[in-house]
Amino acid sequence: MRIHLVFVGKTAFRDIESAIGRYVERLLHYFPVQIHYIKAEKITAATGDRLVRERESERILKLTGRQGHLIVWDQRGRELDSTGLSKLMEKLIASAISDLWMAVGGPVGLSSQLLESAHDVLSLSKMTLPHDLARLVLVEQLYRALTIIKGEPYNK
């Protein structure tokens, strides 16, 4: 299985980008991982949040091409604890999908069309997280889930 992380725009904070890189390196021990950056729309009064969400979500759908399994991370999604995420990952690994896509939206979120197209819509927290921080939480929790599956001590 290949893991594709889809992020809208570049990370604004070098420290967060560095931390994401650290966890991606750890994830590579388990699976090939690729980060895809989708062009972020400029948020202006003329475009409005809805149009920005639609354009960015269209780019995500075009990239993923409905191949593999798409998980979209959104505040309105289903919350899982770390063990729950590891069980979902085990199920996906067992199903022998070739590509797992995980998308995190930009500052204004994702369109309802993308949420409806996803195989799973999950939430990292009921709290609103800055999209840069959400990326870091995602890669850390993904790494944690894989160590749980392997019975490795990181989760302790």
Image (cartoon, grey):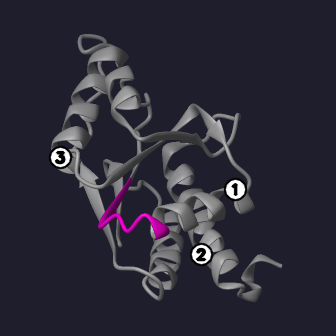
In the rendered image, the vertical position of residue 42 relative to residue 39, given as above or below:
above
In this rendering, position of residue 34 left or right of residue 55:
right
In the rendered image, the vertical position of residue 156 relative to residue 97, given as above or below:
below
Q: Of 103 and 10, which appears nearest the observer?
A: 103
**Identity, as a three-letter code, of the amino acid under mark 2:** Leu
Does residue 109 show up magenta in the picture? no
Query: Disc 3 versus disc 1: distance between alpha carbons?
Result: 27 Å
Q: Tell me which label, 1 or 2, sits earlier in the chain.
A: 1
Are the residues flagged by discs 3 and 2 in contact, CB closer than 8 Å?
no
**Identity, as a three-letter code, of the amino acid under mark 1:** Gly
Are the residues flagged by discs 1 and 2 in contact, CB closer than 8 Å?
no
Residue at which label 1 appears: 84
Query: Disc 3 versus disc 2: distance between alpha carbons?
Result: 26 Å
Residue at which label 3 appears: 65
Within 10 Å of disc 1 (Cα), the crowding (few <14, some 14-19, many 20+) is few
In the rendered image, the vertical position of residue 14 relative to residue 101, given as above or below:
below
Q: In this orientation, does residue 149 appear?
A: yes
The quadrant in which residue 55 appears is: top left
Does residue 98 show up magenta in the picture? yes
Residue at which label 2 appears: 146
The quadrant in which residue 149 appears is: bottom right
Query: Disc 1 versus disc 2: distance between alpha carbons?
Result: 11 Å
Q: Which residues are magenta?
A: 94-101
The quadrant in which residue 56 appears is: top left
**Identity, as a three-letter code, of the amino acid under mark 3:** Gly
